[in-house]
Image (cartoon, grey):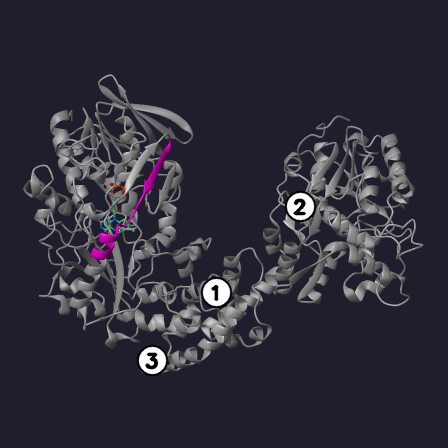
Amino acid sequence: MTVDPQVIIVGSGPAGVSAAWPLVRAGVRVLMLDAATGPVAASPAAESAAAFRADPERWRYQFGGDLAGLAAGGDRSPKFATPLARSVGADYAEALGLQTRGFFAAGALARGGLSTLWGALAAEPPVSDLAEFPGGAAGMRPCFDAVRARIGVPEPTAAAITSEAARRVFARLQGRIAVEPAPNAVLDAPRDGRLACAHTGLCLWGCSRRAIYDAADELPLLRRFATFAYRPGHRVTRLYADGDRHGLEVEAGGARLTFRAGTVLLAAGTIATAALALPRLGLAGRPAPLLTNPAAATAFVVPGLIGAALPDQSFSLGQLFYRLPVEESGIPPWAAAGVLYGGDALPLELIASRLPLSRPVALRLARALAPALVMATCYLPGGFSRNRITVGEGSVSIEGETPPATRRRLRDAVRDLTRAIVPAALPLPGATSILEPGADAHYAGVLPMGGAGPFSSGDLGEIGKGLHVVDGAGLPSLSSTHPTLTIMANATRIGERVAGRVGGTA
Amino acid sequence: MSPGTLKAGAGRGHLILTGASGYIGRAVVEAALAEGRRVTVLGRRPVAGARFVAWRLGEGVPEGALDPDQPAGEQALVHLAHDWGAGALPSPSRGEGLGLGVSENDVEAKGAGGGGASRSLPETSRAHPLSQPLPPRGGEESDPNLAAALILRDSARALGIGRTIFISSLSARPDALNRYGRCKFAIEGLFDRPGEASLRVGLVYGGPRTAMYGLLCRIVGLTPVLPMIRPGQPVQPIHRDEVARGILAAADRGVCGPLGLAGAEPMPFGRFLRELARCTRGRGVMVLPLPLGPVLLACRVLNALPVGPTVDPERVLGLAGVRFVETRADLERLGLTAAPFAEGMAREPATRRLLLAEARCVLGYVLRGRAGGALARRYARAVGTGGAAPLPPLARRWPGLLRWVEPLGGKSELRRRLGMALALAEASPEGERTLARGGRLGRLAALAMDLALDGLAMPVRLVLGSLAR
Ligand SMILES: Cc1cc2nc3c(=O)[nH]c(=O)nc-3n(C[C@H](O)[C@H](O)[C@H](O)COP(=O)(O)OP(=O)(O)OC[C@H]3O[C@@H](n4cnc5c(N)ncnc54)[C@H](O)[C@@H]3O)c2cc1C
């Protein structure tokens, strides 16, 4: 692009690309700056789960060529231990000057951001959870449809449930709680150079078929437009006012550059966006709220499947999506929600490490349990989280806490889920854990749209004329339903409105 | 003769070496030859790959030692030779059985610095061994090594040799407890012109098990309990290859004055020995602190006896007098980083062999079958530094026995390694074969049996676990 950009978008994650589409389609000149560095770890290319299990090179994908993945662990998504996660998350904490206490902060300076490793669960929150959004649920609806159509979220069907254990649990849960085959942003038919899911079960290590949505895969599509330019390796370090335009200080390969545009959309991911926006608003040093979904994890076994052979085909992202009955007594009323996973594609080590047996026996028991396992996550709405983010000079500190009442609610939710599932599957003793705040990687609500007080933004996420927050940082509330589809829908909405204002030239 | 006149890259200077057949000397020759340098050794015996000129300690540099094709100013002399012989205690080899003897290498070249001598310098007064709590100071003025160094230095100056590097010890101090340290210090003083330097070498490890390193390897293999004086004394280990590189760098860079060539991070000698035992023997040693005074007395009593091993107080004092010396800046001047001890040891072939044996044992235990070479090597690589884990000796033969001793919980090293073995075994073709074997009923029956046996083993593991704590 030789002419000045009309709009600069910071970040190439789901939010950034979602905001870019309506702008680019309207002929607006867009420059996307992305801190992405280095290559992302390679994904295994086995034909089936069985072939992967027997692959002599499997260790490389599982632990990385340097075997560093062996040291990982903890109560988080097993995804964080993969070489993929380590390669996309490598410089994040350092670049941000991130310090955490009682909080797990995931982040990725990568093409596609955290969608390079996300779980792809793309459910639309219930209407009641969108009440605080500008224009309400009705205003958001067309945007949800547009995003689904763009990225490919197949209509969930029972046929998509690959885990026999999950299938049995599904049969049991139907009619007891709201449950559906997981609406995943995973292709069931090829499109845009991506292949359909072949149930190789390698989802954890990164899908070499690109069936799982990753915002990075949209970049080549966007770049077909002459009005779109993408600059990786450009990390925005500071925002400043430059007359009636916005200046961005950028660090690129050791060099310091500055960019200017009349309109800037911040899509660096909630935490990184907060790091840029708060100092710009003169709110450096002041703790801001940061919403996350308080989360618990638990596991069940279907006794009749213990010891069964592991299947050839499997899928390690969510199999079922459930929502517990609404707590009408809450203000506003709320419901816990979560995902059920099959255990047949999980590294046995993760199961075995929790079994108080000698290692050879733990390994064999884990293998016997794997096909019978159903693992569950359970999320509460962000209103139950209690985290604070403070942005300082080149530093970001986050403190997290799970208040006792929230713990109690999480335990109650797990209990309710268990009651609904038993006897189709039995709870695995000792398998329930309450995750560290932030381990869900659902970050939102630092500058809620339509909020009051200093920590808020306008209906289009604007925090100044022509300066918009378009990612999770601007969400007015955080549903217990996974946030990314909502983030993308909202970014689309803002992108459309900004396109209308700026006007295309092409 | 100013430093830096050697053109970078253009055939580094010719190297003349005394003490080339010793533990460090050989490493220097190998490293120099590998860099494509020309090397001339001065000594009694030739060394493979190098030019040889006959020479004895006490003689000057023979003129024929110089490379006629190079200006003398671009050539370097490294003085490693040290005469341990003069006045040593009688029949040091009698100490061999206790691991206190010295290797043949030490006769011509200093074994290792830091911890002090391998074999003693002459005692000036040994007339009343029982009456002296500490040996007398002094004596270094009359040490033949001092006179020999002076002759060598003067001849090198006369020939116009550009760089002269004297290999000293980290224990070199005017007030060193042992004579070795005082003597080294006195010699250092001779090399005081530009282009002349002394390298104070720390506790050298790695490579062939000779000299001080060999001695320590043997000592840690002797007994599971090792009594020693002041186990908290700091030592500054440095790998033999790093010493060789440091010496060559000094010869190239034209440094002057005394420079430390030793690990920058001190570690207690006791820990050094424990890690050494882990890496070389695959087991731990318990270090039992001893008080200095009584030990010296015991040495004297022992040495006064006509039979039994001779224990040289020089060695005892060499160790007791060690002090930490800051070397970071010196290493930087040499363009060198000294790897932490555990890291350096991990590269040793012997450590690797032990680790591979451990890998086969631990993986065999988890797999209940043979682990392939690739898998075992992967395990060894994953363990990284830190050497082999202490495994019960019988378990090496029968890995299945680990079931009875496997730690139940906690953060023990063995537990960590068993966890790694499990993860790696699972992610290997042999693991998949083992786990997929048989039908469902057979697997379940075996599992039931296994769970019962684990139940039986539980009390044993509990008891052993609490004992370990
Ligand atoms: C393991 C895991 C599983 C998940 N599963 C799900 C799920 O199933 N469903 C769901 O809805 N959500 C899920 N999420 C959350 C989801 O990934 C995030 O909500 C989503 O990626 C947020 O998108 P974003 O565009 O706002 O930010 P990000 O994805 O974080 O992208 C940020 C972008 O900004 C760039 N950037 C950052 N800082 C700068 C800077 N200073 N200058 C320039 N560029 C910068 C980055 O390089 C990146 O391109 C999951 C997350 C993880 C980690």
User: Bounds of the magenta span?
Assistant: A394-409
What residue is disc 2 on? B242
Left or right: B388 in relation to A313: right
Please tell me how crowded label 3 is: few (under 14), some (14-19), or many (20+) other residues with Cα within 10 Å. some
Left or right: A398 in relation to B373: left
Q: Pick whichever, B56 or A4, lies toward us.
A: B56
Q: Pick whichever, A91 or B233, lies toward us.
A: B233
User: What's the distance in space between the residues labelled 3 and 1, CA to CA?
Assistant: 26 Å
Mark 3 vs mark 2: in front: 3
Q: Is residue A92 visible?
A: no
List the single residue furthest toward the right: B127
Quadrant containing the N terminus of chain B is top right
User: What's the distance in space between the residues labelled 3 and 2, CA to CA?
Assistant: 55 Å
Residue A108 appears at what percent x and percent y?
33, 43
Which is more N-terminal, label 1 or label 2?
2
| Chain letter for the residue marked with disc 1 in the picture | B
Q: Is residue A435 above or below residue A88?
A: below
What residue is disc 1 on? B415
Indicate whether residue B327 is drawn in magenta.
no
**Amino acid at pointer 3:** Leu
Which is more N-terminal, label 1 or label 3?
1
Label 1, secondary structure: give it. Answer: helix
| Residue beneath the point at 31% across and 35% down | A390
Q: Pick whichever, A404 or A205, lies toward us.
A: A404
Label 2, secondary structure: give it. Answer: helix
What residue is disc 3 on? B444
Corner quadrant of residue A74: bottom left
CB of mark 2 within 8 Å of CB of mark 1? no
